[in-house]
Image (cartoon, rainbow, N blue to C red):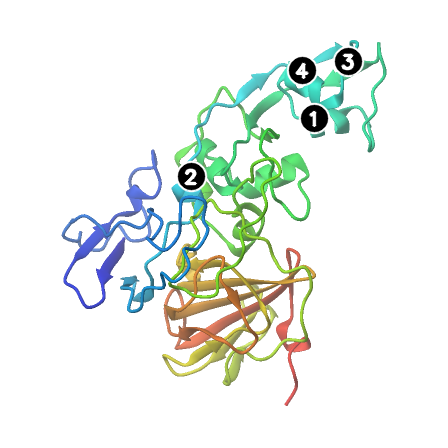
């Protein structure tokens, strides 16, 4: 259950977990709480008035004092929903039977994929084809059977996974997707599982649970052919639409700095009970300013991962990403450029925090790296 409140206003609204997970009824981690009074939540999916429909900023239209929205005790700027919510996917995958195909005049690997409905990458793997994926007239190709989804502009991996009730990580593995994990319009992806069997309630619920890896690999919307990335904005008051494509910086500028000044109360790696911590926990008073560890562009700001509460993810270039969790207030938006040392949020005890603290991660690609090995000593 989530609570919404407009700071400085009186509107309250409750959204139950069932509103987030279609076709998954019954138990959820918050079902034992008393139901809230239901009123309409404030709209979040329309672009603000200072951006046009293409996502470009309208010069001179910076609106001071924009309302903040508080959800789960996390205050954040009013913003559009993430792309996987704003651009849902219809589960209209084509089921392809395993077969062989004889290459005809004018065929390319892409044309064979269009004719058969299978993914070109899957056909290449099944036949041991290497770049530039040359095929010969009369060659017999193995067409791997399965359920293939045709990717459209604006769709995300997370939304595709939710449409079929399959965890995004399984789709990544089934298609052997690699860095930078950006899908392309017209691409076909194999959806694992039996197409004749609907997903179980547990599988559908799992498809709606996110982790950092899901957002990093499946959170970016698919660009149109030859679509240039949107230029990062410089203010949280100027918001890109959720389907705008945002590119990470090409290079990391300088080294990393500590995001807060506090005591490390949990270190990177396995804990005493065997669970793994992909970052460090730094104990700090509530509302301590959280600083960007390096220059970058915000890839996510929200509360989509329950355990981490208020969450900010920043891409820095050279494959580096930083993660800031348990924040009580978010001061940046997706697509906003930030400078090293800039305040991007305030610390808190949101999510599953044990105390007022900051959860901080550094990742190289998808791999978590011990932040203390990258941060200044002393």
Q: Nearer the viewer, mark 4 or mark 1?
A: 1
In-front residue for pair 251/140: 251
Q: Residue at x 75, y 17 (%)?
A: 142
Determine whether label 3 and label 1 are within 8 Å by CB.
no
Residue where numbered disc 4 is placed = 98
Is residue 107 among the parts visible in the rendering?
Answer: yes
Q: Earlier in the sequence, mark 4 or mark 2?
A: 2
Write down the residue under mark 3.
Answer: 106
Locate residue 156 relative to residue 268 in the image: left or right.
Answer: left
Mark 1 nearby-residue class (10 Å; few <14, some 14–19, many ≥20): many
Local secondary structure at mark 4: loop
Visible residue check, residue 144: no
Q: Is residue 85 above or below residue 324?
A: above
Location of residue 6 in the rendering, given as x and y in whole percent from the top left corner: 22, 62
As measured in the structure, the alpha-carbon distance from the residue carrying label 3 to the one carrying label 2 is 36 Å
Q: CA distance from mark 4 to mark 1?
A: 14 Å
Foreground tag (4 vs 3): 3
Residue 87: mark in rendering: 2
Q: Which residue, given by chain and number where applicable, does mark 1 sit on?
A: 120
Query: Would you identify the image quadrant in which residue 112 lies?
Result: top right
Q: Residue at x 44, y 25 (%)?
A: 198
First in sequence: mark 4 or mark 1? 4
Distance (Cα) linking label 3 and label 1: 16 Å
For discs 3 and 2, the disc positioned in front in the rendered view: 3
Pick the residue in front: 61 or 358.
61
Q: Secondary structure at mark 2?
A: loop
């Amino acid at each position: 259950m989530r609570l919404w409140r407009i700071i400085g206003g009186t509107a309250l609204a409750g959204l139950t977990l069932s509103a987030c997970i279609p076709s998954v009824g019954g138990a959820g981690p918050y079902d034992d709480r008393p139901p809230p009074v239901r009123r309409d939540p404030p709209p979040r999916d329309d672009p603000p008035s200072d951006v046009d429909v293409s996502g470009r900023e309208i010069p001179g239209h910076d609106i001071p004092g924009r309302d903040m929205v508080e959800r789960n005790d996390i205050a954040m700027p009013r913003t559009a929903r993430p792309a996987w919510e704003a651009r849902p996917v219809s589960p209209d995958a084509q089921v392809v039977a395993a077969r062989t195909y004889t290459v005809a005049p004018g065929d390319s690997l892409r044309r064979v994929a269009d004719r058969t409905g299978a993914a070109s990458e899957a056909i290449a793997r099944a036949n041991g084809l290497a770049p530039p994926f040359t095929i010969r007239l009369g060659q017999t190709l193995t067409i791997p059977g399965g359920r293939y989804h045709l990717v459209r502009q604006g769709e995300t991996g997370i939304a595709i996974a939710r449409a079929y009730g399959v965890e995004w990580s399984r789709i990544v593995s089934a298609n052997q997707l690699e860095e930078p994990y950006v899908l392309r319009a017209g691409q076909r992806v194999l959806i694992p599982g039996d197409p004749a069997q609907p997903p179980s309630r547990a599988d559908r619920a799992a498809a709606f649970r996110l982790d950092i890896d899901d957002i990093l690999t499946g959170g970016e919307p698919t660009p149109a052919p030859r679509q240039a990335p949107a230029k990062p904005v410089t203010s949280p008051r100027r918001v890109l639409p959720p389907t705008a494509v945002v590119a990470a910086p090409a290079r990391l500028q300088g080294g990393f700095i500590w995001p807060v000044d506090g005591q490390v109360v949990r270190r990177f790696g396995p804990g005493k009970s065997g669970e793994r911590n992909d970052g460090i926990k730094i104990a700090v008073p509530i509302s301590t300013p959280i600083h960007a560890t390096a220059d970058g562009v915000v890839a996510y700001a929200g509360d989509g991962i329950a355990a981490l509460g208020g969450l900010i993810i920043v891409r820095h270039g050279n494959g580096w990403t930083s993660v800031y969790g348990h924040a009580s207030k978010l001061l940046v938006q997706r697509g906003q450029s930030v400078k090293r040392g800039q305040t991007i949020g305030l610390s808190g005890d949101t999510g599953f925090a044990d105390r007022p603290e900051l959860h901080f991660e550094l990742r190289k690609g998808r791999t978590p790296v011990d932040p203390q090995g990258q941060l200044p000593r002393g």
